Image (spheres, rainbow, N blue to C red):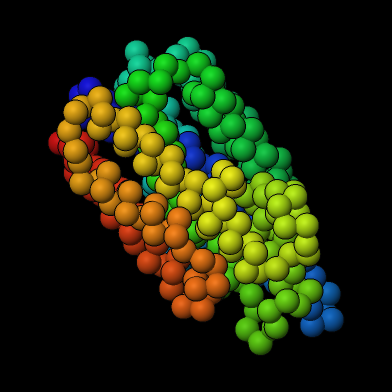
């Protein structure tokens, strides 16, 4: 497979996953912003700065729009063409990449990409605002789910499929770590006790953001505990948005690609090492050493893995 084709498939998968993750992050921010503050005034907190932090867009938003508000977040994280990580940019770039590799995709996969972009430009691009933001976020999640279903249900399990999946799960690992880190390190108000009413609601909202609230109660049969939420999203291999599950899929994709090439790549070694270290980790040790520090290191190593994938398969050429 040509390096350019592999890169287009990889980034198509990443950008569709990023669009869904942004929709989930924005939904969490919106729902938290609607929660009355715990000081008895009945006012709502501004959760939009932590939302921008979770999306990795806080500097760009502040430079272009100033304070983080619902309106500025919609403009920058959803509609800003200059922001390569906005939902609009993600949908547009994924479609552009898909069109470049159209012969490698099934009709259903391509149509899900193309129809999503056409629907966005026709029905959302000019009408999106604070009154319909939740409906839009549900639409994004539905469209990205349709793309993923079409990919899983119709594509031949060959190199093309492996590169799409590889991009998807590298991106998913990054976004799960960001969501968890921002909740633990940024969102909880200063001076408020861990385990308080607001803390409980925020952990529940975080679980909803990754479609894991029901899974949490099914697995643990317990009230929401922060360390169990961290365990679920880091160490539980049956959780499809956990770090260990995402890394297992990255490793499986790289195994398939390297077997087809009959060549060993350094990115497979890095992925195997990171996956093994998570597999042998214990949540007690992670919490004791610092969850924020652990997640920050993971994000750096996952980014390094993405760079190594790009280098090994010559994505930059």
Q: Residue at x 67, y 39 (%)?
A: 138
Which quadrant holds the C terminus?
top left
Q: Residue at x 53, y 58 (%)?
A: 234
Above or below residue 259? Residue 17 is: below
Residue 96, position as x, y percentages in the image: 37, 27
**Which quadrant of the structure image shows residue 265?**
top left
Which quadrant holds the N terminus?
top left
Q: Nearer the viewer, residue 129 or 272?
A: 272
Above or below residue 271? Residue 57 is: below
Residue 206 seen in render: yes
Q: Nearer the viewer, residue 286 or 315?
A: 286
Residue 276, position as x, y percentages in the image: 38, 54
Q: Residue at x 70, y 48 (%)?
A: 215
Q: Residue furthest left?
A: 317
Position of 303 with respect to 87 (left or right) is left
Q: Residue at x 25, y 32 (%)?
A: 258
């Amino acid at each position: 497979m040509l390096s350019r084709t592999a890169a287009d498939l990889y980034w198509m998968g990443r950008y569709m996953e990023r669009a869904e993750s942004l929709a989930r992050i924005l939904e969490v921010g919106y729902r938290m912003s609607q929660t009355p503050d715990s000081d008895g005034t009945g006012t709502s907190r501004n959760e939009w700065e932590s939302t921008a932090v979770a999306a990795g867009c806080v500097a760009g938003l502040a430079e272009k729009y100033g304070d983080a508000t619902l309106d500025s977040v919609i403009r920058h994280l959803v509609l800003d063409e200059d922001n390569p990580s906005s939902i609009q940019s993600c949908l547009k770039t994924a479609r552009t990449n898909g069109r470049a590799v159209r012969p490698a995709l099934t009709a259903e996969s391509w149509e899900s990409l193309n129809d999503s972009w056409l629907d966005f430009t026709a029905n959302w691009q000019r009408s999106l605002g604070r009154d319909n933001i939740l409906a839009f976020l549900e639409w994004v999640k539905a469209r990205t789910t349709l793309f993923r279903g079409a990919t899983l249900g119709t594509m031949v399990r060959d190199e093309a499929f492996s590169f799409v999946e590889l991009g998807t799960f590298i991106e998913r690992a990054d976004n799960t770590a960001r969501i968890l880190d921002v909740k633990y390190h940024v969102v909880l108000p200063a001076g408020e006790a861990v385990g308080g009413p607001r803390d409980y609601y925020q952990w529940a909202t975080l679980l909803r953001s990754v479609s894991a609230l029901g899974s949490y109660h099914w697995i643990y049969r317990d009230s929401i505990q922060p360390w169990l939420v961290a365990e679920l999203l880091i160490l539980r291999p049956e959780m499809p948005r956990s770090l260990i599950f995402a890394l297992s899929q990255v490793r499986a994709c790289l195994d398939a690609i390297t077997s087809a090439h009959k060549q060993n790549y350094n990115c497979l070694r890095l992925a195997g090492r990171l996956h093994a270290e998570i597999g042998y980790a214990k949540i007690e040790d992670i919490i004791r050493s610092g969850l924020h520090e652990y997640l920050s290191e993971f994000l750096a190593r996952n980014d390094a893995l993405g760079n190594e994938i790009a280098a090994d398969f010559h994505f930059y050429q």
